[in-house]
Image: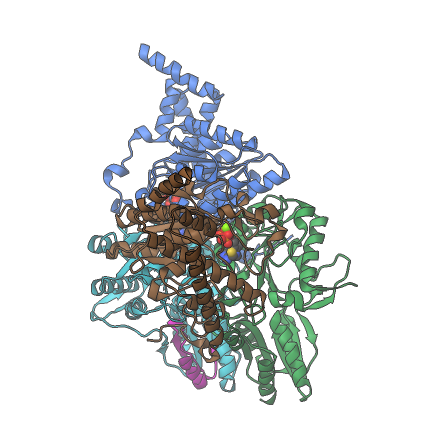
Chain colours: A cyan, B brown, C green, D blue
């Protein structure tokens, strides 16, 4: 089983799907000859041609809005938003159109599109306010839309294939810091990872840490840091933010009776709020301590200067410290 | 008499030159008149408190029937907006289908009563589901046309919008993209001089939206929306271009809004009386009837017969829809995602 | 003290501010001669003229984006979004531009704009999917933006004046069902109601209900329904969703030890999630029962048919039933 | 010799006809050359690993200096984009200011190190804060111009964007609004034929973006961005129109991108070598120097003096910025809201 980076797994998933089904196509800014600013579609233009590897004009509403039409008329578009920070011009087309086409037509029309968006920031990213943002909180509130964000290369390939084959719109969020930092084994064969299932990345009994993306990575590091202190943290990779795997979350909390949610987005109304609210309502009896959220500061996105970026985003040390406090509660 | 003869001759050559028979003319007239009658009935029902809301296409029917008549009703697509009642009829939706939408009944083919009236959809007739946000449909139409082109289906996609909607960014993005790829799409602008209360002079600095097409690399034409044959001719040429791979056409139809914006609006507040009382000479229904008389296709008897038929059809559609139940509350959670 | 409707109070607040300060202006679709589709700017065009009562082209990104420029150059724009459902084309200008201008310029530039948006649905509204939505969840996640939604006419006038005078962008959400249904006394004099303070609408000891907008109305009705059953509910009007009055929320929960949040928006990632998460983290010891959320179904917005709309939105009866269950816990 | 004489005469009349003195020419040249030198130093610093990122204006300097020279540096506004380095210099930002931004230092006047390099801002010079989302700035410029008009300040607002950015909805909405109200705004498009890797033929179906201006009711002009005086002339006329209440002008400057899109990009992958190696004959710095020589304003000695001065200024700015501390982490929560 070959080892590869998250980015390679994403490219491989799209490549195999385009080989398998000629209705599948990619569109976005610089996805053609350049192969995308991160190289996710490297080589596609030469292999699949301009019609199926479409360099669009510089307009995100066009990218999503035209993809809706393409999907309605028999294509299966994978729309790339160059940076998740630039998805907002397409907000109306995603929320009002793609996510509602099926409901508003009472099931008559569907919208099988996948929207890929690199997201996330941090010191290595040097993206500043507009090349670093987490956008999952906005979109996980939207009925009719599925939201996925992989952590392992294995999941990246399997979840992206599942997204492309899904008959409904899926927002596929890829953390930029994981693109090249995470390597893992990826099966050669064709497989999918089901949308809607979380994964227990580390078994534990003392407390449950729920995370995704880069913060899952930091949480796993934090869990090792406190392991020596008789704190046995269970770390769960949510993977799919909507539909959320509530069962796995509640099961873990019923076992550990303590819960922490870690996310890179701004704290207020970030995704951790929903996870916390579900636990507080459905696993209250099991709870043996406050539900703790570790998140970024409530200032507009990640600042550029390293000194400021470091102060903005949580890391393993901050998570470990919070875990110690909660364990001691 | 001589003059009248002459007049007839000249006029007659008009529809014949376009390849339209007398029967075509009568069928086209039927759709214009049917759309008007349905629309008027909808207002009566709303005023009578039978339904909460109506938004209208009165004044736009000639443009819609004319252009849509040039499309292939099996193959081509329509991405409508809320005034497209007449266009939907031409595409094959029935008066019953439309009344089911007005009454928001369980069997409403557009949305099962989930959407406001005039938010048409019908997969059987390739009419894409209409949403409320103005402008989004232009991008859907461009996408449908892109798929038609790469899949080589030969389909043409027609979409429509009001002149106010052309101010939206989506409108520009769709025009630009369709121009770059010479897509088989027809962009209709039904310019009725008002966006609710906002007059066209506050909407744009130019007289004709059609002037913008050149900036996107394809032709834009202006037609008199009360002249059904002129609209048909424009539609026919646009379809030819699209089918031949020559790319999009912007067709701007100058029409009149014969009602308030919707049943929620009172236009007396912003529209001068002389502007509201549109001369019959620019009502497409009147103008088209006059043409049919001139060319001897319409006479008293036939007129009575057609309008009698329409009255019956409208009444049947109304009674049929009204009698059916509303959507079952238990279905409110259905079709959020694909159900297989 | 004259009695008036919520809509009249909103109109009065803008009228007085435009009289007081000639930099204040309104812009939006149909705000001119027509006076707005709900009449909020009725008569303004005649009194203040076309330059300060601006009928814009049909483009929401233009309405907000140009308002940003107007504010930077000395005007104080009140931008009207005709229906909150149509705010999405302006999402990028609100989130990326208006809300970040001050932070990204390190305080050098500010953006004193108020964005008014009628929202909300229900049987009386007959708005369907696109004339009924609640949008507060999206915007209350945005640092740099304030989000306000009044319930009483008194608050409507005072909060809107505070919003107009606020040096930073404020999203002012007005529930359509309250426009004409709620009457109340509104002082003649010039006053403001501070942004960031909640209001206790009903004192109680059994449990705390947190709500806003139309759902506050339903919650107050529910409180009366259960009052006869020895359930003494405290009902709190959040009024400002961001910055949120956390103190008042925690105080109430510490008193009643039971919390319910009621909102009209879709449940998942709705505003109630944040309120619940704050309570679960900061008032855990005080809690004597699960934190209950009552919200609308997770389907794309309010359907048009009354039968469906009624099934979608919570009402006093549903709230009362939940209150009984929680009280009995 | 005769011909050279003649040439000089003709050319000389060019800047004089525009009301520019020899000193003006030298000052303009200084800004073009200074912008280039700063920009080149920024790349060196990035390649040396001293800073993480650089995005460049090389090739655009002539257009920016030419147009901006026609504005009133006290009164008028600039709403820049990330290639506007030369424009910001003309407006009054210093090399130290710009280097502080590159190094993201505490004293960076643009954002205090919060934004990526090239996201300029400076209230002292009426340069509005730059964001990354392409296209938004056009609406801000229209709003600033609207305020200038209703407040009667006589200010003109200049904004700029690349040709790719013209595909954004915001671009269209701003053009349309400015046309309707004849706003005192100058819309510059710096057309360098590429949007990162996307060639202009995939961006639009027309050769010149300027062709679109007519559809918004105001003039659009195309100028050679390597001809500083032509850009100045276009700017001068646009400022005159704006100041006189005649409304907006779209000025499209055809320029060359002399570097990769940014330090993250490798253009060899999508740009043919012969396209990358831009002939010196269209490098504004070379062309402008040649003109100054022709008209006898520039000679060896002066050239050495100017470039010596520039080298010193660039080095001073670099050392100054590098020596200063990064932003204090404690300030990360500042200025989310007004602090009085
Ligand atoms: C994005 C958006 N903004 C606002 C509205 C509210 N609205 C509905 S129709 C309309 C006016 C449309 O005018 P026009 O495009 O000229 O079409 P007409 O109604 O005149 O046929 C407005 C402002 C909307 N539906 N969508
Ligand atoms: C809304 C948005 N989408 C995508 C990007 C990423 N991006 C930055 S620059 C650029 C290309 C811009 O091309 P053009 O407008 O021609 O300007 P140029 O860089 O060529 O000067 C892109 C796609 C962005 N900054 N904003
Ligand atoms: Mg109109
Ligand atoms: Mg370019």
**x, y (%) of residue A268?**
53, 67
Query: In the image, is residue C98 above or below residue D285?
Result: below
Quadrant (top left/top right/bottom left/bottom right) for the C terminus of chain B: bottom left
Question: From where the camera sits, is residue D81 visible?
Answer: yes
**Horizontal side, residue C179 vs residue B245: left or right:** right
The image shows residue A6 at horizontal and vertical percentages of 30, 64
Q: Is residue D253 left or right of residue B37?
A: left
Q: Residue D51, percent across and down? A: 40, 48
Q: From the viewer's perspective, is A44 left or right of A167?
A: left
Q: Is residue A253 magenta?
A: yes
Regarding residue D50, the answer to whether it shows in the image is no
Quadrant containing the N terminus of chain B in the rendered view: top left
| Residue extent of the magenta highlight | A234-259
Name the residue at 61% across, 56% down.
B266
* Residue sticking out furthest to the right: C1
Q: Quadrant of residue C154?
A: bottom right
Closer to us: B16 or A53:
B16
Q: Nearer the viewer, residue B339 or A159?
A: B339
- Image quadrant in which you'd find residue A93: bottom left
Q: Position of residue D33 (x, y in %)?
A: 41, 31
């Amino acid at each position: 089983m070959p080892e590869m980076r998250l980015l390679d797994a994403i490219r491989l998933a799209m490549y195999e799907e385009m080989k398998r089904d000629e209705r599948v196509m990619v569109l976005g800014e610089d996805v053609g000859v350049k192969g995308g600013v991160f190289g996710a579609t490297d080589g596609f233009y030469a292999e699949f041609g301009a019609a199926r590897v479409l360099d669009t004009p510089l307009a995100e509403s066009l990218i999503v809005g035209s993809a809706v039409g393409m999907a309605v008329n028999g294509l299966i578009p994978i729309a790339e938003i160059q940076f998740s920070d630039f998805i907002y011009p397409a907000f109306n087309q995603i929320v009002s159109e793609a996510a509602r086409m099926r409901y508003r037509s009472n099931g008559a029309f569907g919208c099988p599109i996948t929207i890929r968006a690199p997201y996330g920031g941090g010191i290595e990213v040097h993206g500043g306010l507009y090349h670093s943002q987490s956008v999952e909180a906005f979109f996980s509130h939207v009925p009719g839309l599925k939201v996925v964000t992989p952590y392992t290369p294995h999941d990246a390939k399997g979840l992206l294939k599942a997204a492309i084959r899904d008959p409904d719109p899926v927002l596929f969020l890829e953390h930029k810091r994981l693109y090249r930092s995470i390597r893992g084994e990826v099966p050669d064969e064709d497989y999918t990872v089901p949308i809607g299932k979380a994964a227990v990345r580390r078994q534990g009994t003392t407390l449950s840490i729920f995370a995704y993306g880069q913060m899952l990575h930091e949480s796993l590091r934090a869990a090792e840091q406190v392991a020596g202190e008789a704190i046995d943290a269970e770390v769960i990779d949510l993977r799919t933010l909507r539909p959320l795997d509530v069962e796995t979350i509640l099961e873990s909390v019923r076992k550990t009776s303590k819960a922490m949610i870690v996310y890179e987005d701004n704290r207020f109304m970030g995704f951790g709020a929903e996870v916390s609210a579900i636990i507080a309502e459905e696993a209250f009896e099991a709870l043996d301590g406050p539900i703790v959220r570790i998140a970024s500061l409530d200032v507009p996105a990640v600042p550029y200067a390293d000194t400021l970026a470091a102060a903005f985003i949580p890391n393993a040390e901050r998570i470990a410290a919070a875990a110690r406090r909660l364990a001691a509660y | 008499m001589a003059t009248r003869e002459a007049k007839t001759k000249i006029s007659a050559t008009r529809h014949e030159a376009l390849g339209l028979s007398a029967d075509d003319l009568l069928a086209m007239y039927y759709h214009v008149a049917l759309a008007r009658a349905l629309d008027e009935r909808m207002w009566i029902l709303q005023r009578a408190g039978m339904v909460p809301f109506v938004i209208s296409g009165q004044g736009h029917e000639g443009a819609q029937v004319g252009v849509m008549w040039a499309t292939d009703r099996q193959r081509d697509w329509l991405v409508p907006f809320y005034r497209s009642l007449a266009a939907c009829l031409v595409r094959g939706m029935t008066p019953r289908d439309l009344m089911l939408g007005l009454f928001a009944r369980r069997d409403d083919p557009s949305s099962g009563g989930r959407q406001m009236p005039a938010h048409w959809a019908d997969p059987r007739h390739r009419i894409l589901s209409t949403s409320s946000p103005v402008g989004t449909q232009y991008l859907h139409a461009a996408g449908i046309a892109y798929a038609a082109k790469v899949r080589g289906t030969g389909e043409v996609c027609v979409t429509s919008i009001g002149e106010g909607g052309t101010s939206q960014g989506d409108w520009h993005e769709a025009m630009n993209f369709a121009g770059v790829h010479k897509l088989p799409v027809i962009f209709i602008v039904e310019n009725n001089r008002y966006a609710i209360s906002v007059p066209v002079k506050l909407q744009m600095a130019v007289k004709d939206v059609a002037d913008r097409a050149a900036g996107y690399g394809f032709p834009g034409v202006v037609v008199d929306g009360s002249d059904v044959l002129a609209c048909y001719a424009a539609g026919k040429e646009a379809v030819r271009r699209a089918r031949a791979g020559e790319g999009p056409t912007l067709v701007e139809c100058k029409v009149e809004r014969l009602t308030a914006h919707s049943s929620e609006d009172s236009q007396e507040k912003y529209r001068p009386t002389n502007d509201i009382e549109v001369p019959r000479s620019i009502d497409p229904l009147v103008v088209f009837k006059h043409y049919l008389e001139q060319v001897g296709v319409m006479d008293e008897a036939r007129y009575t017969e057609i309008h009698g038929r329409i009255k019956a059809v409208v009444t049947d559609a109304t009674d049929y829809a009204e009698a059916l139940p509303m959507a079952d509350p238990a279905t409110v959670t259905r079709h959020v995602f694909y159900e297989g």
